[in-house]
Image (spheres, helix red, strand yellow):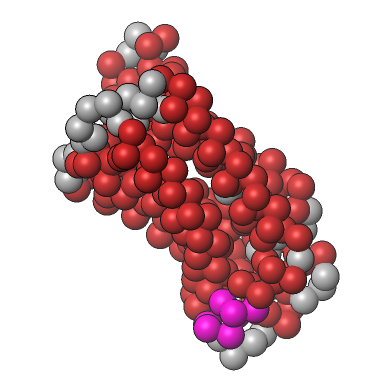
Amino acid sequence: MFAIYKREMRSYFVSPIGYIYLAIFLAVSGVIFSLTTLTKGASSDISLYFTYMLMSFFVVLPLLTMKLFADEKRQRTETLLISSPVSLTSMVAAKFFAAFSMFLIGFLVSLINLVPFFYFASGTPDTQTIFGSIFGLILIAAAFIAIGVMVSALTESQLIAALGTMVILLLLVMISAFNSSIDSYFLRSILSWISVMDRFSALTVGRFDVSAIVYFISLCFSFLFLTVRVYEKRRWA
């Protein structure tokens, strides 16, 4: 498993994709921080920054996951990967953790934005909200990356993998927007239950929401499980 993880991490930096991802992620986070916080006169309210960062995930995270399995198919190395003396679960987990590690690198660097915020904020920053939002974004990123891993396993085209992942993530992020136009309470309850924004909001208020945490972790493991099942079927096909 660790050998596959190292290979994936190395592939991000021997090709332009890793540098492109980090450049785009840091540029997006910097622009969002500037527009939502600095231009508001250093307000102590930073919640809008984290909300827009979440919405940016559906664009930037597919850049990390689109190549994971699609590139193996394109280069005809998928058979070697499947037949390697590593369990399919370990193989999928290694690729997932490589993409997640790249996300954490960019995300942790982007938190430098908070340094001037704490220094220049006009009021007392709500640290519970800030750390709750950070924790929530990390959980959501893990779930989104798992979705991207599965989509990448279904195609040999990196472009299709990226676009397919973007569509799924956009629906998960924007699903709460449909609630106001639905008359059925039952349907609204279902949409609220699966809504990423609603779950994220529960964490941003500084409350340790167990149901939200379980939801994101379950979403992550479910899509990784489905990816393993996809490769189990191919191994025995």
Residue 171 in the image: above or below residue 134? above
Q: For the stretch drawn in magenta, what is the main secondary structure?
A: helix
Q: Could one spot residue 215 in this view of the protein?
A: no
Q: Residue furthest front?
A: 120
Left or right of 115 in this view: 226: right
Q: Which quadrant does the C terminus fall into?
A: bottom right
Q: Residue furthest right?
A: 75
- Asked whether 206 or 187 is in front, the reply is 206
Spot occupied by residue 24 in the image (x, y as percentages of width and height): 64, 45
Q: Position of residue 188 (x, y in %)?
A: 33, 20
Up-down: is 232 above or below 206? below
Q: Quadrant of residue 212?
A: top left
**The magenta stretch spans residue 203:** no
Q: Residue at x 77, y 76 (%)?
A: 77
The residue nearer to you, when weighing 156 against 105, is 105
Q: Residue at x 41, y 27 (%)?
A: 37
Q: Which residues are magenta?
A: 1-7
Residue placed furthest toward the left: 207
Q: Nearer the viewer, residue 83 or 53?
A: 53
Residue beneath the point at 50% across and 30% down: 34
> In the image, is 127 to the left or to the right of 93?
left
Q: How many marks?
A: 0
Residue 188 visible in rendering: yes
The x, y position of residue 135, in whole percent, is 31, 50
Looking at the picture, how far across and down is residue 79, in whole percent? 74, 78
Residue located 74% across and 71% down the image: 14
